């Protein structure tokens, strides 16, 4: 295609510049996608402030961030034409695995040793165009807006955790962590047939949205002036369950206390899925005997292997609504401003998104 485009180039912590650069070329197996919407992930904020290194060989920029991307195919390479045409509306799976390392050969694409991730190790979506392997694009239904489609990536991560959690019809399920991923997990638990659904977090705005999205009860564990305040989380889980502890607990938060509430708030035969990322030195202390004798399953979920068709179907069917999670919208010119604002911690924040417009 050739020509030039505007892209937000991240150089080093707190230095990101809107530049004019060449439009990337598309090889035989690539698509060139005109970006329509990009979610701003907590990890983008973390990269921007230098709290975590990039996935590039030296952990540094220059790199275009942004990995939650939807757009329109602008160019399709020779092999990519098997499945895509110019004009197709797509969402992108940013985690481009090598397909050859031992983990890939075992189908564990989330653990690939030579992964190339859009916005993390290769240029991502905070640009007018992005190059992606055609194996990592999925077409989206006409009914799904670009803004929602951009959130397929976090939804796929939520979907993978919920697949491991395996909510059964009638289960008492608890989601601990009231961010955008928690709200997605809540809707998935409902769609999978949870009988009773409890939602626990630290901010009233997402908790109250949770009530509209299927939660039977919500608890604010932080603010004593909240109408939903619950000082004793485990007791609250028991009361909400009508005297019974949870069958299924998923933890989309990094809070180390929350990781333990899952252990103490779950009952006999329970499954727990850990999702939020604690610090490198954090430890979960499992009450070993109780957990063994309760025959519990503790599982962990990382990224989103093999669940993208399920996530796109959840959006297409309306089983999961992500459009209401977008609390902060920014124009392309305001990507950096958006990242800084989201870091400032507005209590009404749920999810930030860049709409190219
Ligand atoms: Zn993300
Ligand atoms: Zn691999």
Image (tube, helix red, strand yellow):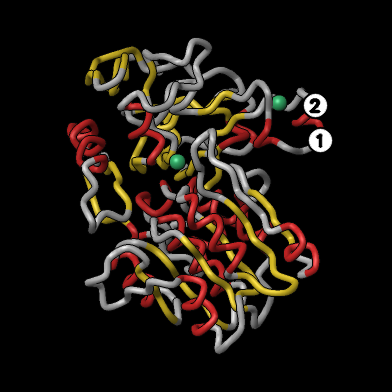
Disc number at residue 106? Answer: 1
Q: Are marks 2 and 1 in contact (CB under 8 Å)?
A: yes
Q: Nearer the viewer, residue 189 or 172?
A: 172
Q: Nearer the viewer, residue 306 or 20?
A: 306
Residue at image coords 67%, 74%: 267
The quarter of the rendering in which ligand 2 is drawn is top right
Badge 2 marks a residue whose secondary structure is helix
**Any atom of ligand 2 within 8 Å of the CB at mark 1?**
no
Q: Is residue 75 in view from this perspective?
A: no
* Location of residue 178 in the rendering, given as x and y in whole percent from the top left corner: 40, 61
How many tags in the picture? 2
Q: Nearer the viewer, residue 42 or 248?
A: 248
Residue at image coords 50%, 54%: 252
Residue located beneath label 2 in the image: 102
**Any atom of ligand 2 within 8 Å of the CB at mark 2?**
yes
Q: Residue 106 falls in which quadrant of the image?
A: top right
Q: Nearer the viewer, residue 63 or 46?
A: 46
Q: Is residue 320 above or below residue 301?
A: below
Q: Residues within 10 Å of mark 2 (few under 14, many from 20)?
A: few
Q: Residue furthest top?
A: 58
* Location of residue 255 in the rendering, given as x and y in whole percent from the top left corner: 45, 51
Say left or right for 164 vs 72.
right
Q: Residue 260 falls in which quadrant of the image?
A: bottom right
Badge 1 marks a residue whose secondary structure is loop
Q: Residue furthest bottom?
A: 242
Disc number at residue 166? Answer: none
Q: Residues within 10 Å of mark 1 (few under 14, many from 20)?
A: few
The Cα atoms of the two marked residues, 2 and 1, are separated by 6 Å
Q: Residue 123 falls in which quadrant of the image?
A: top left
């Amino acid at each position: 295609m050739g020509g030039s485009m505007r892209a937000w180039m991240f150089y080093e912590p707190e230095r990101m510049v809107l530049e004019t650069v060449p439009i990337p070329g598309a090889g035989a197996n690539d698509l060139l996608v005109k970006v329509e919407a990009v979610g701003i992930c907590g990890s983008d904020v973390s990269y921007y402030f230098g709290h975590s290194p990039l996935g590039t060989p030296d952990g540094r920029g220059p790199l275009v961030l942004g990995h939650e991307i939807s757009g329109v195919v602008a160019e399709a390479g020779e092999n990519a034409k098997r499945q895509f045409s110019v004009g197709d509306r797509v969402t992108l799976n940013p985690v481009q695995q090598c397909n050859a390392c031992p983990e890939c050969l075992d189908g564990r694409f989330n653990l690939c040793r030579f992964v190339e991730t859009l916005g993390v190790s290769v240029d991502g979506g905070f640009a007018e165009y992005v190059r992606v392997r055609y194996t990592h694009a999925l077409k989206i239904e006409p009914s799904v807006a670009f803004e929602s489609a951009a959130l397929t990536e976090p939804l796929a991560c939520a979907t993978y955790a919920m697949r491991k959690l395996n909510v059964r019809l009638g289960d008492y399920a608890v989601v601990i962590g009231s961010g955008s991923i928690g709200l997605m997990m809540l809707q998935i638990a409902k769609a999978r047939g949870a009988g009773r659904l409890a939602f626990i977090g630290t901010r009233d705005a997402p908790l109250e949205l949770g009530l509209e999205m299927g939660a039977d009860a919500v608890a604010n564990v932080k603010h004593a002036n909240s109408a939903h305040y619950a000082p004793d989380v485990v007791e609250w889980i028991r009361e909400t369950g009508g005297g019974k502890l949870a069958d299924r607990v998923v933890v989309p938060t990094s809070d180390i206390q929350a990781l333990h509430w899952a252990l103490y708030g779950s009952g006999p035969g329970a499954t727990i899925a850990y999702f939020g990322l604690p610090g490198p030195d954090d430890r979960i202390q499992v009450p070993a005997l109780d957990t063994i004798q309760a025959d519990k399953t503790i599982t962990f979920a990382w990224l989103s292997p093999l669940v993208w068709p399920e996530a796109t179907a959840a959006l297409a069917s309306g089983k999961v609504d992500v459009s209401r999670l977008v609390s902060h919208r920014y124009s392309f010119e305001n990507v950096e401003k958006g990242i800084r604002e989201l870091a400032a911690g507005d209590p009404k924040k749920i999810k930030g998104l860049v709409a190219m417009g």
